[in-house]
């Protein structure tokens, strides 16, 4: 079994797939709207501070554990201590739950790609969005279609599926993003949008903003559910993991910033609200697209961009439980993918319907979709990261110096791993539960 494990064809393949995992709905959908709701530039300043200082610690830690054990989550935790397997199992479980709501949004994106091609005139975009996500059969069909596309790549294997998809979709994403940014900057009053993003008003700083930035940073880097651990386990040998980690963080931040520069100038140019929340991308932007020349083309490019980002991230989310099924149950990749297809569908369909027919089913006051999002983003992801940091820092006593080859950053890593990151994560979980 051991030597049959797949591995990346090159270091480039590892880096591009990991960036593919990181750059997703978190960057292009969530980041702009969370920034919009938290006052723009102040949020960005705090976010950059966090992502450039403490975030490399859990990221490096997760990749390192994967790379040094060369196992999927349960196996990796068990090789640290046989009693820890159940904690490892929380990771693929989190993956299944995240995948189940991620594919719902993936389905919406497919609808907007169709819309851009068919170019129907819509009078009220807000109303359209709400009535579209309520249609039971159509929205479930789209959810399953999106899931199927992701599972298809996963089933083809690490090299032929996951790598191939990322090597095609990520450059496409970069080109489309640059095209759309240039387009947006040429709109009248684009500078007001840039000011909103880059001129901070520090009087808006508060603890909620701080924790939102922290949660966003961890989510966007894909830490906390074993996706990185699994990707790290496919690296043949550890060449320079630290350098890769910085490349991943820099690229992810660049994509998020560019997404902001693509969206906010357009929003301000058309006198719209930057704080409309989750609807920013599905309501505000389509409204703008309908008012600019070649809007359909731009809209098509934008939703293909969003689709590429979402697929490469969803693949990484699915790969973690997939690797666990393959290696724990000793079954083939295709079988594991079929099993996952059914399990994820079973949760994703009620999640899709929770915007329509099942909207009255509430768990602690939240719909099924919101419960999945809340439970994973606010509780399970920070908890998994917290557990892994504590294991590495206090049980394995990993030394930053050995990883970073530098006394000062090594010491910062040690203190971060043992104290700063766990305290920050405990704060996040606490805020989530309040
Ligand atoms: N980082 C991705 C995004 O920004 C989402 C994602 C992929 C993720 N894999 C993950 C989030 C693992 C948390 C854990 O959209």
Image: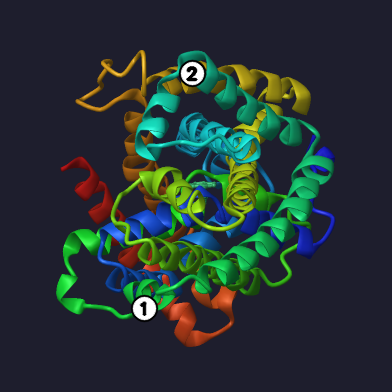
Is residue 42 placed above or below 76 in the rendered structure?
below
In this rendering, which labeled residue sits more in front, label 2 or label 1? 1
Height in image: 237 above or below 30? below
Q: Position of residue 246 (x, y in %)?
A: 58, 73
Judge the density around disc 1: few (<14), some (14-19), many (≥20) Cα neighbours within 10 Å.
some
Q: Tell whether 312 sits left or right of 398.
A: right
- Quarter residue 68 falls in: bottom right
How much space separates mark 2 and mark 1, taking CA atoms?
A: 40 Å
Residue at 20% of width from left, 58% of height from top? 208
Which image quarter: residue 106? top right
- Position of residue 11 measured from the top left corner of the image (x, y, whole percent): 77, 64
- Of the 4 image quadrants, the one containing the C terminus is top left
Residue holding disc 2? 349
Question: Is residue 137 placed above or below 316 in the rendered structure?
Answer: above
Name which residue lies at 45% across and 18% down: 135
Question: Is label 1 in a helix, a strand or a loop?
Answer: helix
Tag on residue 198? 1
347 lies above or below 75: above
Residue found at x 40% / y 74%: 189
Q: Residue at x 55, y 65 (%)?
A: 255
Quadrant location of the N terminus in the rendered image: top right
Q: Position of residue 306 (x, y in %)?
A: 58, 49
* Residue 130 percent coordinates (x, y): 37, 30
Instruction: Please state if 401 lies on the left or on the right of 265 as rendered.
Output: right
| Towards the viewer: 103 or 355 | 355
């Amino acid at each position: 079994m051991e030597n049959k494990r797949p591995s990346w064809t090159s270091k480039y393949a590892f880096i591009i797939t990991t960036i593919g995992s990181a750059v997703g709905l978190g960057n292009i959908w969530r980041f702009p709207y969370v920034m919009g709701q938290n006052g723009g530039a102040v949020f960005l300043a705090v976010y950059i501070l966090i992502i450039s200082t403490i975030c490399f610690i859990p990221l490096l830690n997760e990749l390192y554990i994967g790379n040094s054990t060369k196992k999927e989550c349960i196996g990796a935790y068990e090789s640290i201590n046989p009693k820890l397997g159940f904690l490892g199992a929380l990771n693929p479980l989190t993956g299944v739950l995240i995948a189940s709501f991620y594919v719902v949004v993936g389905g919406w994106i497919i609808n907007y790609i169709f819309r851009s091609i068919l170019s129907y005139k819509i009078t009220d975009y807000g109303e359209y969005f709400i009535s579209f996500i309520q249609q039971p059969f159509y929205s479930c069909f789209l959810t399953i279609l999106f899931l199927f596309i992701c599972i298809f790549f996963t089933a083809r294997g690490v090299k032929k599926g996951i790598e191939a998809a990322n090597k095609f979709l990520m450059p496409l994403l970069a080109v489309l993003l640059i095209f759309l940014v240039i387009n947006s900057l040429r709109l009248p009053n684009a500078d007001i949008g840039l000011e909103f993003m880059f001129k901070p008003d520090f009087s808006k700083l508060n603890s909620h903003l701080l924790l939102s930035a922290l949660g966003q940073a961890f989510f966007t880097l894909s830490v906390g559910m074993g996706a990185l651990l699994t990707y790290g386990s496919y690296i043949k040998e550890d060449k320079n993991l630290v350098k890769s980690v910085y490349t991943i963080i820099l690229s992810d931040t660049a994509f998020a910033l560019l997404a902001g520069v693509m969206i906010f100038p357009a929003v301000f140019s058309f006198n719209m609200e930057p704080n409309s929340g989750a609807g920013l991308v599905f309501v505000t932007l389509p409204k703008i697209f309908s008012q600019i020349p070649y809007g359909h083309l731009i809209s098509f490019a934008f939703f293909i961009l969003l689709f590429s980002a979402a697929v490469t991230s969803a693949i990484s989310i699915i790969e973690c439980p997939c690797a666990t099924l393959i290696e724990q149950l000793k079954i083939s990749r295709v079988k594991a993918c079929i099993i996952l297809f059914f399990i994820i569908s079973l949760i994703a369909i009620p999640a899709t319907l929770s915007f329509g027919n099942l909207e009255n089913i509430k768990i602690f006051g939240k719909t099924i979709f919101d419960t999945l999002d809340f439970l994973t983003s606010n509780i399970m992801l920070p908890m998994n990261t917290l557990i892994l940091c504590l294991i590495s820092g206090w049980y394995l006593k990993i030394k930053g110096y050995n990883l970073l080859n530098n006394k000062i950053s090594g010491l910062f890593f040690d203190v971060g791993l043992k104290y700063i990151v766990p305290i920050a994560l405990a704060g996040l979980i606490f805020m989530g539960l309040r």
